[in-house]
Amino acid sequence: MNVGLRLKDELVAEVDRIAASNGQTRSSWIANAIARAVVSPSNDDLPNLPLEGRGHPDDLIRVTIRLHRSEIEGIETVGACLGLSRNEWIKRTIRWQLWDKAAVLRLAPATASELGKARKLVMKMSDNVNQAVHAMNAANMPGSSLDIARIAGSFIEMCGDFKAKLFEARRSFSSSVGAEVGYWTSNHEGREG
């Protein structure tokens, strides 16, 4: 089965450099990188090959690879779980194999959604704290009929709830981002190798 990719010149040049250094074609290296989803540490010290006459580094280049139907079906299955198309999953896998760190972490749609939920939870908590502080300030004003002791007591109770919710949000952030990075770098405990 053929799969086409549009890649930037700099990405194709890096794939070509690594493939040539390993005695492989571009297509076979990409297929192997996707199949094992792990880059060998020995690739870090490979020499840079000259990039003469290749055009602008931001130009997109079409790359075609051949994969077995079962591999394509597997890519589609795992990509769907992350909200990624087949091409998006393949491009993301190749990019994670070429660089040790994701310079710009572009989260998969499923991960971004989970982080959005955690962010909304934190925003709701900050709104509640803001309202409680305003109530305490109003109760502390001269001539106020509000009972500051009652407002402060409920605020202190609320703070205990907030602490638990903040830890929950932190766990959610950490889990989502850790799972995302781990998935693409083969370091996540839930990943089968």
Image (spheres, rainbow, N blue to C red):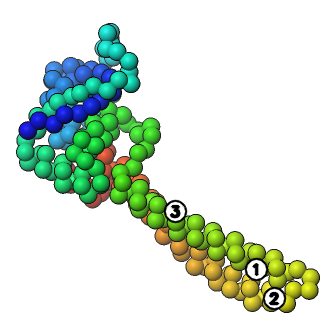
Taking 124 as reference, is 191 above or below it?
above
Q: Which residue is mark 3?
A: 119
Which residue type carries mark 3? Arg
Q: CA distance from mark 1 to mark 3?
A: 25 Å
Residue 174 vs residue 105, the one in the foreground: 105
Query: Residue 134 at what x, y percent from top left?
Result: 76, 75
Q: Residue furthest right?
A: 142
Q: Tag 2, which secondary structure?
A: loop
Give the side of residue 55 with respect to residue 160, left or right.
left
Which residue type carries mark 1? Ala
Q: Which residue is mark 1?
A: 135
Q: Tag 1, which secondary structure?
A: helix
Residue 112 vs residue 158, the one in the foreground: 112
Q: CA distance from mark 1 to mark 2?
A: 8 Å
Give the side of residue 69 with respect to residue 164, left or right.
left
Which residue type carries mark 2? Leu
Residue shown at 27%/20% (left/top)?
17
Q: Which residue is mark 2?
A: 146
Q: Quadrant of the N terminus?
A: top left
